[in-house]
């Protein structure tokens, strides 16, 4: 569905690579628990760091846009360990209390605070207004609360959360991805802030921002399809 021009052999290869990637990612996250600052050695190339530095220096914070592409946990940890700004990830917590506690503890050890996607919106807004960073993975299906926006050529429900936060606060939306080059070796790619206009029509602005966020995540997926969490039913309206 997402890559209609690819053949079955290529798609099977990407799926196999995705499973291998998830295994490596899990091992890497466990390895970082011993010494989170290893992440600074693991990132061997970085493009666009000046966008994060500028956002941190402005005191307005940043909304970090990414997807389940590359090692998304490592991206947040790298920001924290670089000391650019405190970062809070908006996450979908497990329904199992023990699993939730374990994953939160692992993320906290890496320097990343967490906030449930079901928490009041004001909590994320308050984080941004303190000049801190908020990280959002924007590639999952938005469910009944989402808005319809194009993603990889298909109209599909998309969470408008990041767009709403930007509209409310004027905080820059900065796309970032951590692409694996080899085991424990990554390139961080940071794109310029997404440009958008507030205007007088809130709903139109939210849709426009959400569409542009989807476009930025599309670029991440197309750059590393074998490192994308393709197992998630992103296009459930279509199958």
Image: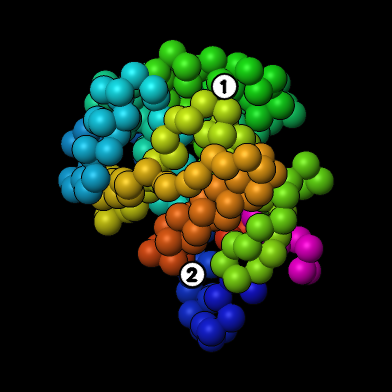
Which residue is at the front of the view, 158 or 11?
A: 158
Please state if 37 lies on the left or on the right of 235 as rendered: left
Q: Where does residue 154 sit, x and y in percent of width and height?
A: 66, 68
Label count reads: 2
Q: Magenta segment range?
A: 232-239
Residue annotated with mark 1 = 124
Which SS does the magenta portion mostly show?
loop
Q: Is residue 113 visible?
A: no
Assess disc 1: are there few (<14), some (14-19) or many (≥20) residues with their C-alpha within 10 Å of its C-alpha: many
Q: Is residue 57 visible?
A: yes
**Is residue 40 covered in magenta?**
no
Q: Where does residue 215 sit, x and y in percent of width and height?
A: 50, 59
Q: Earlier in the sequence, mark 1 or mark 2?
A: 2
Please identify, in this view, whether the residue under mark 1 or under mark 2 is nearer the observer: 1
Label 1 sits on a secondary structure element that is helix
Query: Taking 120 as reference, is 67 above or below it?
Result: below
Write the residue at 48% across / 74% down: 13
Write the residue at 52% across / 26% down: 169
Question: Residue at the right extreme?
Answer: 144
Please state if 97 lies on the left or on the right of 19 as rendered: right
Residue annotated with mark 2 = 14
Assess disc 2: are there few (<14), some (14-19) or many (≥20) residues with their C-alpha within 10 Å of its C-alpha: some
**Is residue 235 covered in magenta?**
yes
């Amino acid at each position: 569905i997402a890559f209609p021009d690819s053949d079955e052999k290529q798609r099977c290869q990407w799926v196999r690579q995705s499973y291998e990637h998830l295994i490596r990612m899990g091992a890497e996250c466990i390895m970082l628990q011993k010494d989170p600052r290893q992440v600074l050695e693991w990132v061997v190339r970085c493009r666009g760091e000046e966008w994060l530095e500028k956002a941190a220096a402005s005191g307005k914070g940043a909304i970090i846009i990414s997807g389940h592409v590359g090692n998304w946990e490592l991206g947040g940890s790298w920001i924290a360990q670089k000391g650019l700004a405190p970062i809070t990830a908006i996450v979908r917590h497990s329904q199992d209390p023990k699993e939730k506690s374990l994953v939160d503890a692992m993320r906290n050890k890496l320097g990343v605070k967490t906030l449930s996607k079901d928490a009041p919106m004001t909590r994320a807004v308050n984080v941004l207004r303190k000049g801190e960073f908020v990280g959002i993975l924007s590639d999952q299906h938005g469910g009944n609360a989402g808005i319809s926006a194009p993603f990889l050529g298909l109209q599909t429900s998309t969470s408008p959360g990041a767009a709403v936060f930007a509209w409310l606060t004027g905080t820059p939306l900065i796309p970032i991805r951590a692409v694996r080059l080899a085991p424990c070796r990554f390139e961080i790619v940071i794109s310029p802030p997404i440009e958008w206009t507030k205007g007088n029509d809130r709903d139109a602005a939210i849709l426009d921002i959400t569409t542009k966020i989807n476009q930025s995540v599309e670029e991440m997926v197309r750059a590393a399809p074998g490192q994308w969490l393709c197992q998630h039913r992103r296009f459930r309206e279509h199958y």
